[in-house]
Image (spheres, coloured by chain):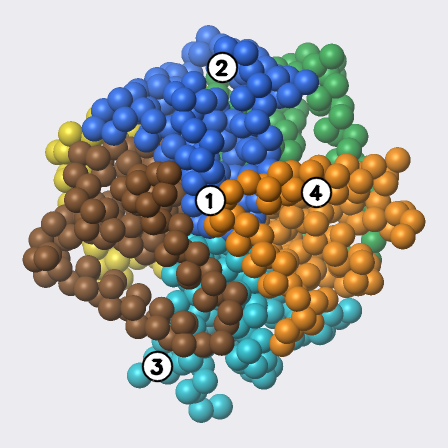
Chain colours: A cyan, B yellow, C brown, D blue, E green, F orange
Amino acid sequence: MENNIVEEFNDYRSKMNDKIMSSNNKIIKRIFNLDTNAYQEGSLSEVTKEMLGLACSMVLRCDDCVKYHLGKCHELGIKTEEIQEVFSIATLIGGTIVVPHLRRAVEYWEALGKVTK
Amino acid sequence: MENNIVEEFNDYRSKMNDKIMSSNNKIIKRIFNLDTNAYQEGSLSEVTKEMLGLACSMVLRCDDCVKYHLGKCHELGIKTEEIQEVFSIATLIGGTIVVPHLRRAVEYWEALGKVTK
Amino acid sequence: MENNIVEEFNDYRSKMNDKIMSSNNKIIKRIFNLDTNAYQEGSLSEVTKEMLGLACSMVLRCDDCVKYHLGKCHELGIKTEEIQEVFSIATLIGGTIVVPHLRRAVEYWEALGKVTK
Amino acid sequence: MENNIVEEFNDYRSKMNDKIMSSNNKIIKRIFNLDTNAYQEGSLSEVTKEMLGLACSMVLRCDDCVKYHLGKCHELGIKTEEIQEVFSIATLIGGTIVVPHLRRAVEYWEALGKVTK
Amino acid sequence: MENNIVEEFNDYRSKMNDKIMSSNNKIIKRIFNLDTNAYQEGSLSEVTKEMLGLACSMVLRCDDCVKYHLGKCHELGIKTEEIQEVFSIATLIGGTIVVPHLRRAVEYWEALGKVTK
Amino acid sequence: MENNIVEEFNDYRSKMNDKIMSSNNKIIKRIFNLDTNAYQEGSLSEVTKEMLGLACSMVLRCDDCVKYHLGKCHELGIKTEEIQEVFSIATLIGGTIVVPHLRRAVEYWEALGKVTK
């Protein structure tokens, strides 16, 4: 059942991204391209960049962004202890207002762990 | 089925607004009145004002506010190409954190197009 | 049926908080402890502190935080007229972007009133 | 010298508010009027309302709003221990991102204490 | 003297933008390019787009962004009554927390009016 | 001259932090202690943690927080190319509203480079 929140998120995200990419909106298409490029290995590793994306998503309190970066962190093999340290820095910086997003993040991370790769 | 997200939003909004307007809270009632006045034709057209409301709602990442202004934009006959330009400016200003709200906005705009007027 | 939104919120919150407190994340555990201490009677009463928490949660537009503080305000016997004044100040400070959260807050407060203590 | 940050803030605020109130912008004039009304004694005391305004201003990280409400709190005779509890709740809710605003708030509160009434 | 706040803003902005564009940061350079493209005439006029940029900057409470878009609005010949309606919608949506930014925006708009073109 | 923005920031920060730590506010003192602990080497390195702090500070648009973490990054010997990648991810996530803070961050990073250690 926990897999469902992962699949549900990925399915909706893919469906709507396809719709957006098939439209004529050049500015948004370029933002999507930049988004792919920005997280590729450069002076910083992909692992560091995904953790940056995760922390920023938490302090900005965007559940879907948190889910996306948690998915990427999971693919890259980042460990639970490392994710917890990202969570703790984000919660400290963003305050207790981040806690409801932390709850959902913890739930999603657990669900990712049960996905058969 | 897509109609449902439009009806569901409008029904809940009406029900709760009625409840709020029937209470004794003068400050909030006046804010609601101001909200109606502010978007009426003045030096700027209603069309421009609704697009301002839409863009602000997107950068502030308020899905319900986005839905409300999309509904108004639809009533006023604003075209999809114009809405897309509002979306692109809001996404550029607000960053990729706006993208999940863009997905839901695109879905809602599509649903509005299927509503029989 | 209205009780459900109260129970649902409390159940999910308890389940996930237990999970978080059983992990090794010291920083987050300490933030949770601080959160308990900060709202205890001091120079300011618990009532005042919970209203501060409620107002801040509304302007920061965090539905779950609003629900939590509304629950506490209800336990402490704060009256509907007082809650409405907190709502009106928060809506004035935070602007119409707060209104969708106000709708859900009004609904939750009503649901709390129907909970048999 | 510390008085200067108080005078400077009040002078600029008065000058610009006069300019705004002398313009034809009805919506903004009404928002200004609401702002005066909302903080008047009602079901909640002025003291409680000013503390709500202060806490919201801190979590939203608006230095000028913090200064304004600190000035009001000072006029109403709110004690330093009470102000500190408002500060601590706001910092906990808003996170360490609030700390730079806390520094300026502490400085301003101290300056207010040196103003000869 | 009022010219100074305009010149000061433009000079610092140009100096730092040049520095940023002369660095190797491809992602940021592309964001800067997108920023130029997004406000060009398309389905929506430049005038409408600059007003969207102004409103979004106000609700996000970014003084420098407000100044930039006010400068553009001034170049495009947008009238004071129109600017005031943008201000009023932004203040209503964003709440009284926007007011300190409104004060500075009104001051800057006045300063722009005194700039000899 | 560029050193001044570094010294000025550090001096004011130290002075006010001392004042805050010498007060009786236990909650805030504990938040300050947590702040020190959270960035110490754990599962993640200090370098990674400071970059997380920097990125979060940028997307939350807190200039003083950005300065603090840039100072720490400089002490830890993080390279300009790495800092630029943090900047680019933060600007992409947070949008063009982050750009004025990017300008000040670039200026501060340059000033740090001229500080004789």
In this picture, residue F97 sits left or right of residue A63: right
Residue C83 point in image, percent of width and height: 23, 38
Which amino acid type is marked by label 3? Glu
Which structural element holds mark 1? helix
Respond whether the residues carrying marks 1 and 4 are from the same subunit. Answer: no
Residue D92 point in image, percent of width and height: 46, 50
| Residue located 15% across and 52% down the image | C112
Q: CA distance from mark 1 to mark 4?
A: 19 Å
Which circle's residue, 2 or 1, is located before the other in the chain? 2
Which chain is mark 3 on? A
Q: CA distance from mark 2 to mark 1?
A: 31 Å
Q: Nearer the viewer, residue C63 or A97?
A: A97
Neighbor class of circle 4 (other Cα within 10 Å; few <14, some 14-19, many 20+) is: few
| Residue located 38% across and 28% down the image | D50
Which structural element holds mark 3? helix
Which residue is under mark 4? F14
In this picture, residue C7 sits left or right of residue E65: left
Which residue is under mark 2? D17
Which amino acid type is marked by label 4? Ser
| Residue located 46% across and 44% down the image | D88
Which structural element holds mark 2? helix
Which residue is under mark 1? D88
Q: Nearer the viewer, residue C31 or C16?
A: C31
Which residue is under mark 3? A2
Is residue C114 visible in this depiction of the protein?
Answer: yes
- The label nearer to you, 3 versus 4, is 4
Image quadrant in which the N terminus of chain C is located? bottom left
Neighbor class of circle 1 (other Cα within 10 Å; few <14, some 14-19, many 20+) is: many
Which amino acid type is marked by label 2? Asn
Q: Check if mark 4's residue and mark 2's residue have beta carbons within 8 Å.
A: no
Which amino acid type is marked by label 1? Ser
